Amino acid sequence: MDFTSEASVAIILVNWNGYSFTKACLKSLDKVKNPNFQVILVENASKNPEGQQLKNEFPKILLIENQENLGFSGGNNVGIRKALEMGFSYILLLNNDTEVEPDFLELMLRKINENPKVGAVQPMICFLGEKEKIWSAGGKWNSILGSAKTLGDRKSIKDYSPSSDILDWATGCCILVSRQAILEAGLLNEQYFAYFEDVDWSLRIREKGFSILLAEKAKIYHEAGASSKKKNSEGTLSPQVFYWLVRNQFFLIRRRKSLLGLPHHLTRFCLWMLYFFLRGRIGKLRSVAKGIRDGISQNLQAAPECPH
C-alpha cells in the first residue's frame, strides 16, 4: 500500500510503561474504516521491552525505540520527523490510553479538508470509563490571564452543544495536523517535556494563519492520565506531574507575554501549596515550589524546526 498518497495519515503513539493501554488502543485502530494510515509506535524507553512485544502482536506497526524517555513532546517529535520523512500528508498524535470509534479518522479528515487553511482538528473526546461524559471538546485561550481552558469539561455529551467549531487550541491527546501546518509552525517544543506543549503548538499553528477546528461527530475515549496516575500517600497524581504543570504554565505565559498571567497563576499555585501543606502532601508542595522557581527563572528554548 502506498502510504505517501494524497490522503495518507501517520498515527503516532508514544508508549512508556503502558503496554495494556497501548494494546487496547491498537486493537481499536484495527477497526478503523479508512485503510490509508500507518501507525508509528514510539517506544519511550519503558522498563520492559514493551515496544517489541507490541510489534510482535501488531506486525503492521512501524516501531521506533528511543534509548531514553523523551517525554510527550520529544517522543512525539521522533514520530513526527519520521512521518515527514516518509511523506505523509497528515499526522495524527494519539495518546496511547485512548480507544477510538471506527469512523473517527474519516470524520476528522473530512473536517480538515473543509478549507486549505484548516491546519488541525481534534475530535470529541469522552472519558473511557464514562463514555457519555466529555473529557475535552477543544480549548479556549485567555491571552490576558495566560489560561488554557478545556471546553465541555465533564459535561454530558447529549446536552453539550458547542457554540462554534473554531478552537483556540487542540489537545495533544488526539490532534490531526496537516503536513503544511507542521512545516510552517515547527515541531512540539521539547522544553515542556509533558503538559502545555499542545497549547503552545496550537497557538503557533494559528499564528501561521491556520485555523483549528472541532470535528464534533468524530469521537474517541480517553483514560486520562494513565501514565501519570499512581495511588500513594501523595494522592493519585505524582509530585512530578505537578512540577511539570506549574513550570510549564509559567513557560507558556512568558512566551505569550500574558499581561496578568504571572500574578494570576502565582496566586493559584500558592493556594495549591497551602492545600498540600494542610493535607500533609509535602512532596507535592515542594514540586509546586520548584515548578514556580524553574518556570520563572529558566531560559526559554525555541521549538525545533522541521527537517528539510
Image: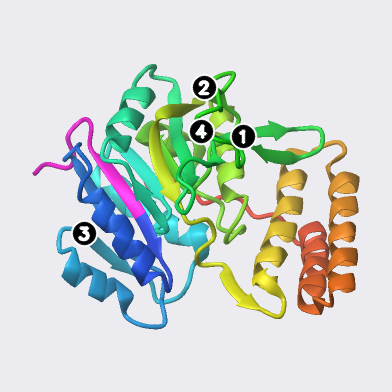
Q: Amino acid at mark 3?
A: Ile
Asked if the residues shown at circle 3 and circle 4 are in contact, with their CB atoms under 8 angstroms apart, the answer is: no
> Tag 1 or tag 3, which sits nearer the N-term?
3
**Relative depth, front residue between 107 and 47:** 107
Marker disc for residue 157: 4
Number of residues whose C-alpha sits closer than 10 Å to that of mark 3, classed few (under 14), some (14–19) or many (20 or more):
some
Q: Amino acid at mark 1?
A: Leu
Q: Main secondary structure of the magenta part?
A: loop
Nearer the observer, disc 2 or disc 4? 4
Q: Which residue is mark 3?
A: 61
Nearer the observer, disc 1 or disc 4? 4
Please give the name of the residue rendered at 75% of the width and 32% of the height, measured from the top-left corner.
Answer: 143
Please give the name of the residue rendered at 50% of the width and 25% of the height, measured from the top-left corner.
Answer: 210
Residue 96 occupies quadrant: bottom left
Q: Which residue is mark 1?
A: 151
Please give left or right for residue 50 compared with residue 291 in the image.
left
**Cα distance in 3D space between marks 1 and 4:** 12 Å
Marker disc for residue 165: 2
